[in-house]
Image: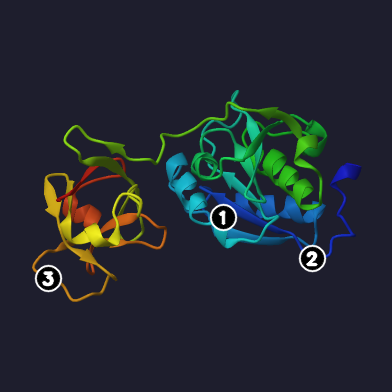
Amino acid sequence: MHLKHLPNSMSSKPSVLTLLTDFGVADYFVGAMKGVILGINPTAQIVDITHEIARQDIEAAAFILLNSYRSFPSGTVHVAVVDPGVGSTRRPIAVSAAEQFFVGPDNGSFSYVMDREPGCVVFHLTAEEYFLNPVSQTFHGRDVFAPVAAAISNGVAISKLGTKVKDAVRLASLAPTVGSRGSIEGRVIHIDHFGNCITNFTREQIKLSQEVHARIRINGKKIKSFRQFYGEEPSCEKLFAIWGSAGFLEVAVRNGSAAEVLKIERGERVSLLIDS
């Protein structure tokens, strides 16, 4: 093991590292990453955000990470590996943002965090002495991202890990746009386990005083009902809108899947109209 990987015995508290992947839990991948991290930093506290991201679904990874990182303390190192380009020319990167660190492939996984945190700094990971040797062309999660994350958790400065870049890959912005007739145009950015359709509309688009005048159009359906919680007594309308815990407006159905009722997938266009 390289000397720079040795644990930092001067640390006053255990470091927190999170893992987010599309690996599932049936294979050895997640366990191997944890083993590498603990071999470099035995006191690390490793938290599994999820390993059930749909295979190669970068947008889902970006959304889950966006709504997870603020729950963790400063200094946390997040490892996000949804990596269909592993072994190709895509860059491995580390990002410093919001007093936390993010390590993974440069494929847009950190887009939404970087959009929210304008002061972020991105480094292309080139310091190979912090990688495992040899590096597998099919498992950078174990051989690149896990050891780099462990090094950061041990106090290695992110600036020592590579060169600063300003052209990190970005997904489409979460910001809605203004339509030709004054509507606000958005999209479904995530469909959760329950079938709730999470849009990219936030409180910036709809104030509380405007909810009674707001209408949502999605796949030919108009939704006027806003509710406070999922189990609220139903009205005559099956579909309703609700402010979810992630801060985005959701379209939901009580005790059912809005995605199935609407017959939609992520990316579906959504229009928001507010009557004067």
> In the rendering, which numbered label is found on residue 140?
none
Q: How is the image coloured?
A: rainbow
Q: Is residue 204 above or below residue 46?
A: above
Q: Quadrant of residue 49?
A: bottom right
Q: Earlier in the sequence, mark 2 or mark 1?
A: 2
Q: Is residue 177 visible?
A: yes
x, y percent for residue 98: 62, 50
x, y percent for residue 63: 45, 48
Q: Amino acid at mark 1?
A: Tyr
Depth order, front residue of 199/129 = 199
Q: Amino acid at mark 2?
A: Lys
Q: Which residue is mark 2?
A: 13
Q: Earlier in the sequence, mark 3 or mark 1?
A: 1
Q: Is residue 237 above or below residue 187?
A: below
Q: What is the secondary structure assignment of the residue under circle 3?
A: loop
Q: Residues within 10 Å of mark 2 (few under 14, many from 20)?
A: few
Q: What is the secondary structure assignment of the residue under circle 2?
A: loop
Q: CA distance from mark 2 to mark 1?
A: 19 Å
Q: Earlier in the sequence, mark 3 or mark 2?
A: 2
Residue sitting at x 56%, y 55%: 69
> In the rendering, which numbered label is found on residue 235?
3
Q: Amino acid at mark 3?
A: Ser
Residue sitting at x 35%, y 50%: 204
Depth order, front residue of 192/214 = 214
Q: What is the secondary structure assignment of the residue under circle 1?
A: helix
Q: Residue furthest left?
A: 236
Direction from residue 173 to residue 257 in the image, left or right: left
Q: Which residue is mark 1?
A: 69
